[in-house]
Image (cartoon, rainbow, N blue to C red):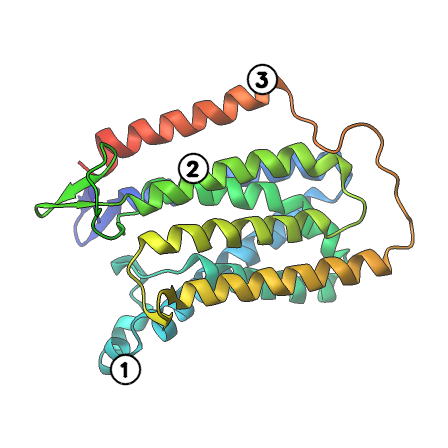
Amino acid sequence: MKTIFSIGHYSINVFGLFIAIGILVGYLITLKETKRKEFSTDTITDLILYVIVFGIIGARLYYVLVFNLDYYLDNLGKIVAVWDGGLSIQGALIGGGIATLIYSKIKKINLWKAADIMAPGIILGQAIGRVGCDVFGVVMKNKYFWGVLMDGRLLHPAQIYESILNYILFGILWARRKSVKYDGQLFFTYLIGFSINRFIVEFFRANPMFIDPFTVAHATSAALIVISIIGLIILKKGNKTKNKIKGKMFSITTGEIVLILSMIIVSLLLYYFWVWR
């Protein structure tokens, strides 16, 4: 990982910085949605803290169990060394989902309304956080100008592929958020969208195989898509309010589109001229 600065044995790296920025921006977006939906700001803030903690635990456990189990069985003390790298976003989603489920049961809040409120902020945070990631993709078969040259090899910048797709998904969710028919619809749309994004990007990464040419992350993405579709069907059938959509199904201003495009451009500039240099 690229280090920004060090104090003694402790270092601040680029990936950690972008994750922190992603969490902050995602939190601010979530607060905006919380007020719009007239939900408790304190409740959402508390929930986000639990989601972050459980998300990190889930991300680490998933990585240890799926991506490098043999190494960690021989080096048990390294399991907790998250500062050395080794986190899985899919594991973070599972851990965060468990935290949300438990918290909603204890506090007796509307689980799916809270999930919808957090969905746009989560994917925007993921898009920003990915910019600082230094886990590159496989070697390019053809030389493209956007490839990253490392150790004499031209690699796919898989992390920036995922970042761009996540920015686009954020735009879709942001435009869709005012026209959902029932609580939970936006969250499962996010889960399906992100799983599709990761399924695509996974073809450019080198991860443990499930069934060649599909990796374990492919299998996880497929499972999340199936679960999400089932969840949408169940929630739709259980919806008693029969909300009618007023206006457009997608609503987004020109300024918001420009802002999202600007974030993509800034991310690309930071990535190519600072992060991987």
Q: Is residue 132 above or below residue 233?
A: above
Determine the secondary structure under disc 2: helix
Distance in Å between CA atoms under marks 2 and 1:
35 Å
Q: Quadrant of residue 71?
A: bottom left
Q: In percent of the image, x 25 and y 34: which residue is there? A: 146
Mark yes or no: residue 237 visible: yes
Q: Nearer the viewer, residue 265 or 18?
A: 265
Position of residue 194 measured from the top left corner of the image (x, y, whole percent): 52, 50
Distance in Å between CA atoms under marks 3 and 2:
18 Å
Q: Nearer the viewer, residue 25 or 252?
A: 252
Q: Residue at label 3?
A: 255
Position of residue 262 measured from the top left corner of the image (x, y, whole percent): 44, 22
Disc 1 packing (10 Å; few <14; some 14–19; many ≥20): few
Q: Is residue 111 above or below residue 80?
A: above
Q: In percent of the image, x 54 and y 46: which residue is there? A: 122
Which residue reaches farthest top? 255
Reading the chain from its start, which is encountered first: label 1 or label 3?
1
Three-letter amino acid code at disc 1?
Answer: Leu
Position of residue 212 measured from the top left corner of the image (x, y, whole percent): 35, 69
Q: Which mark is residue 73?
A: 1
Determine the secondary structure under disc 3: helix
Q: Which mark is residue 164?
A: 2
Three-letter amino acid code at disc 3?
Answer: Gly
Q: Is residue 72 above or below residue 45?
A: below
Mark yes or no: residue 22 visible: no
Mark 3–mark 2 CB contact (< 8 Å): no
Distance in Å between CA atoms under marks 1 and 3:
51 Å
Which residue reaches farthest bottom? 74
